[in-house]
Amino acid sequence: MINFGLIDEWAPSAGLVTTWSASATSIARAGEAPIHPVPPSHQQEEYLRAARRNEDAGFRFSRLCLISFDLEGPLDVDAMTRTVNEFVSRHDTFLSYFSLEPSGQIARHVVDADVVDFVPTQYGHFGDSQSIRDHVQAKTPGPFNWDCLTFGTIEREGNFTIYFAVDHLNSDGISQALACVDLIALYGSHVSGNPHGLAPAGSYIDYCRREREGTQELTVDDPQVSQWIELLEQNGGHLPTFPLDLGVGSEGYTRSALRTVRIMDEVSAQRIEDVCRALGAGFNSAVLAVAGITAHEFTGSDSYFGMTPKSTRTTPAEFNAVGWFTNLIPVPVDITSESTFTSVVADTQSSYERGKTLSEVSLHRIVELIPDDSPVQVGPGWVVPMVSYIDIRKLPGAQMFDHINGGVFGNRGSSEEVFLWVNRFPEYTVMTLMYPGTVEADESISRYIDKILQIFSSVADTGDYAPGEAVAPSVDDRTSLVGS
């Protein structure tokens, strides 16, 4: 299993800490890079603007992603140094950085690969996890810095931990798995002298060029734009929201909370998948259908406006590339009091397939195109609830995660909505929710989890679920909490 959680929950054992950061000379040379003609992706641009608006928050507002894993044997520092520099040079998202120009434009700068020079600094023995966590977060710069990524090792007798911390600007979920595979392969190659066997990585800069060229000529009359706007109009002119109270006020920041729950074993997951396959649907549609039925039961609304991330990687090389290759797509579904899981999941699959046709058109770009006189009103810094499904079994290197104590963690930033990830492992399926850390949200999330568990349990046991059939079991009765 991969360990998921906030960085606060990362618990590396004590050891000798060495950190690889960009050298002062490479940072100075990177600062001389001219403006590049390819802008950031739409998602990157809005992320950077949000980071700039909230730079005085008093904490790291931008998302910091961290992966860690353990390797046996003594650390070869020279091999690790070569590994780090080859890894950074291999993925051109790490060769870019961004500046906010006087015109208000966010401009890309691209450094030459020969500028890359990450060097090790030994910081001595750290005796507890908290001091290591504090060190990693303090040493990793924010998203407007070229060097918004650091690497490190924690050495002990007979083994060591490798960690990689990077701003979300340069990474998505698939990227974190790819980074783990790359670092292990490259380090093994530099230790042994044998080829690493990694396929060439695609260009994230080329992806951003393709996205921008594809969206710059769009108008409100284009089918993809009008389809998005029509969906928002049908939702009362607003973006979707979580179906229960989160206790989020209009002033200040609400720090993130996170809860991870094991929701079913693989036997139950396979039963649910069999039900879905018989109806022409996949497991991802089961997850979205359950979220939709849950929202219907809490709100009584006959329409569910689901949003789910979709990978925008399209070429074989891009599937080897680290970068933020995702967009949100809409998955609207009609659900009534007569609906059941089996009647909803096939419609959800059809809706998901329609939504995939919009994956190349970022909602951020759609918001830019909404006419001033439109009933659709979306303000700056918008956020929506997200439901994601990943079959971890299919990720690169998934088979080795159990053996290397692999982990994926995020910093405790600010949350206004609920992000839900369902991850399917070989032996069980886990649900992780990131949400505002308020008393009201804690209560709402508990109720939400109970309902999700009830629906999945019914489908696994009986092949269907009808809203309102049974009282939801408590979390303690149904499952064990993996994290909170």
Image (spheres, rainbow, N blue to C red):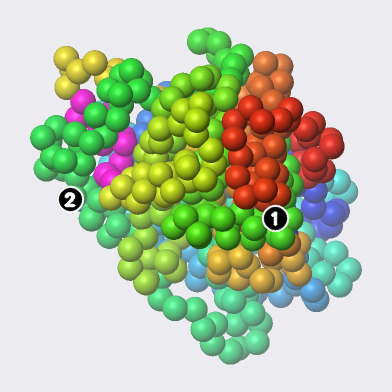
Quadrant that contains the N terminus = bottom right
Identified at 40% across, 32% down, the residue is 334
Which stretch appears magenta? 358-370
Residue 188 % position (x, y): 64, 80
Q: Is residue 248 above or below residue 448?
A: above
Q: CA distance from mark 2 to mark 1?
A: 45 Å
Q: In the depicted view, which residue is nearer to us: 462 or 2? A: 462
Q: In the depicted view, which residue is nearer to us: 251 or 226? A: 226
Residue 172 numbered tag: none
Residue 371 % position (x, y): 17, 22
The residue furthest bottom is: 194
Residue 439, quarter of picture: top right
Residue 36 appearing in the image:
no
Q: Is residue 234 above or below residue 342?
A: above
Q: Mark 2 or mark 1, which has the lower sequence index?
A: 2
The residue carrying mark 1 is 268
Residue 128 % position (x, y): 86, 46
The residue furthest front is: 338
Of the residues tagged 2 and 1, which is closer to the observer? 1
Q: Is residue 447 above or below residue 276?
A: above
Residue 213 numbered tag: 2
Judge the density around disc 1: few (<14), some (14-19), many (≥20) Cα neighbours within 10 Å: some
Q: Is residue 286 above or below residue 89?
A: above
Quadrant that contains the C terminus = top right
Identified at 44% across, 35% down, the residue is 306
